[in-house]
């Protein structure tokens, strides 16, 4: 039976959107935690460590996110590891985020010039203290715009997990389209919801960059 | 008086490229030593070896009871006793003047923040910038930034101060204020080694001047003697240039 697109359907989409948001937050927190540990090691670690991290980043970046998702969901089930879709989706998106965030943050750390390290050395600070008090706070400021830009990508890319049957915003839209046959109404609403999530993120980035620059005068 | 800084036949190279070899230098407590020479003569590199920013490949360095050899890894104790000021100031741009100065006393020397603040106030007074204590570095002029950098190094109560071309990045009208601070520091008895292009400062303030040329100490002596009566044609040419 064909239904007409209605307010109830919007509620259904919004419920899907909460999953999109949750997935984005999970992958950002888990991926971010991994990257926060690995990005400094990627810059300062002993060379085998640097090479391994770089290898990980290259492999993940060169693999389509969808393939990572399929590997986590279908691939692991072959090995008799059956992950629920939320888990498979969360893990794959975290892997994906970690690889890109390592690379973004590596660049931000390397953007802090050698004189800053040397000043820390000359003041007898240890390597960890230099990172903690001198390098990372400065790297953090320049990291805000590209990091938020990447978060916007993550929010939109969560849509690939629709393909393993996880009902997030895009999948919810697909389901609704199948029962209403009103693709424009449905998918424009979906697009509008994505916009409502992503646009404030970009605004926050601008605001944070602005505030940091003001505070610092 | 036994030397507080002593370089014993130190050598430095980057791969196959030798910067200098077999350099020896001895500095007494309270002595002010100016190191002059053309760019590429190895003078900044030599200075940077003294607090281990550059690793030496041979010889050894003794500073205030600490010793650096080519294989020395732990430099923290030595660096506590050696302050350094850089050409590029290298202030921490995300920290206020107060935070720049108190960072190392707090996290390295574990001073309480009131103690560290008191130290900051006293060193800032000595460089004449107490009113800038809450400013951020980028609101200061180059000369003021460099004076803060000197104050930051002094806050660690070093026994020796190294100055690496500290006025080279400054506009000519700003060099005076920095040199004045250094002069006061010299008068107060600080042991100072400075790489500089300020010939008049070297001549008037430094007890000893060292002329480096082609990776060697070419000529060395009491400043007034060395400048008025250079023995080598290279130094004569350098001073007249």
Image (spheres, coloured by chain):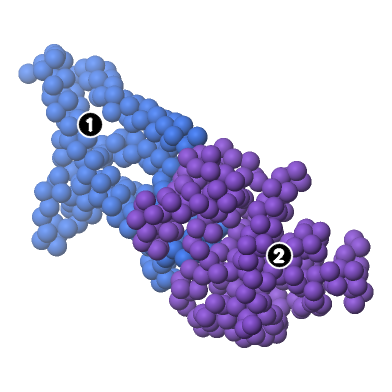
Chain colours: A blue, B purple
Front in this rendered view, residue A66 or B62 = B62
Residue A16 shows in the view: yes
- The relative height of residue A210 versus residue A115 in the rendered view (above or below) is above
Q: Mark 1 points at which residue?
A: A170
The residue furthest left is A1
**Image check: A100 left or right of A85?**
right
Alpha-carbon span between mark 2 and mark 1: 65 Å
In the picture, residue B214 is in which quadrant?
bottom right
Q: What element carries label 1?
A: helix
| Whole-percent x, y for residue A155 in the image | 29, 36
**Image check: B118 left or right of A184?**
right
| Contact flag, marks 2 and 1 (Cβ < 8 Å) | no
Front in this rendered view, residue B231 or A168 = B231
- The relative height of residue A208 versus residue A65 in the rendered view (above or below) is above
**Which mark, residue B195?**
2
> Crowdedness of circle 1 by 10 Å Cα count: few (<14), some, many (20+)?
many
- The relative height of residue B124 versus residue A130 in the rendered view (above or below) is above
- Badge 2 and badge 1 in a common chain: no
In the picture, residue B40 is in which quadrant?
bottom right
């Amino acid at each position: 039976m064909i239904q007409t697109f209605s307010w109830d359907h919007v509620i259904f989409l919004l419920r899907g959107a909460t999953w999109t948001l949750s997935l984005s937050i999970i992958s950002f927190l888990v991926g971010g935690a991994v990257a926060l540990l690995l990005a400094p090691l990627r810059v300062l670690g002993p060379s085998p460590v640097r090479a391994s991290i770089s290898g990980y980043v290259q492999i993940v970046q060169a693999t389509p996110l969808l393939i990572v998702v399929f590997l986590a969901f279908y691939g692991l089930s072959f090995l008799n590891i059956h992950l629920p879709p939320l888990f498979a989706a969360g893990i794959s998106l975290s892997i994906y985020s970690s690889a890109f965030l390592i690379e973004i943050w590596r660049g931000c750390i390397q953007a802090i010039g050698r004189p800053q390290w040397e000043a820390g050395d000359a003041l007898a600070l240890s390597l960890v203290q230099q990172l903690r008090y001198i390098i990372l706070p400065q790297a953090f400021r320049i990291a805000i715009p590209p990091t938020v830009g990447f978060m916007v990508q993550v929010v939109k890319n969560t849509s690939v997990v629709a393909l393993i049957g996880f009902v997030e915003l895009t999948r919810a839209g697909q389901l609704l389209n199948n029962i209403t046959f009103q693709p424009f109404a449905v998918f424009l609403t979906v697009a509008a919801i994505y916009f409502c999530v992503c646009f404030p993120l970009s605004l926050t980035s601008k605001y944070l960059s602005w505030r940091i620059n003001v505070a610092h005068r | 008086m036994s030397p507080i800084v002593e370089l014993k036949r130190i050598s430095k190279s980057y791969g196959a490229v030798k910067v200098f070899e077999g350099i020896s230098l001895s500095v007494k407590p309270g002595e002010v030593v100016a190191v002059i020479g053309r760019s590429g003569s190895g003078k900044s590199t030599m200075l940077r070896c003294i607090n281990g920013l550059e690793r030496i490949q041979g010889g050894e360095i003794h500073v205030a009871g600490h010793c650096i050899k080519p294989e020395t890894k732990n430099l923290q104790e030595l660096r506590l006793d050696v302050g350094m000021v850089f050409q590029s100031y290298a202030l921490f741009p995300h920290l206020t003047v107060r935070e720049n100065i108190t960072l190392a006393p707090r996290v390295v020397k574990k001073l309480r923040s009131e103690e560290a603040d008191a130290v900051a106030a006293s060193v800032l007074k000595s460089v004449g910038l107490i009113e800038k204590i809450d400013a951020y570095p980028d609101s200061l002029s180059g000369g003021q930034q460099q004076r803060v950098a000197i104050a930051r190094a002094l806050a660690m109560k070093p026994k020796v101060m190294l100055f690496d071309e500290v006025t080279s990045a400054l506009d000519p009208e700003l060099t005076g204020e920095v040199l004045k601070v250094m002069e006061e520091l010299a008068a107060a008895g600080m042991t100072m080694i400075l790489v500089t292009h300020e010939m008049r400062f070297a001549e008037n303030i430094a007890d000893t001047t060292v002329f480096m040329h082609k990776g060697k100490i070419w000529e060395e002596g009491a400043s007034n003697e060395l400048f008025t009566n250079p023995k080598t044609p290279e130094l004569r040419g350098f001073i007249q240039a």
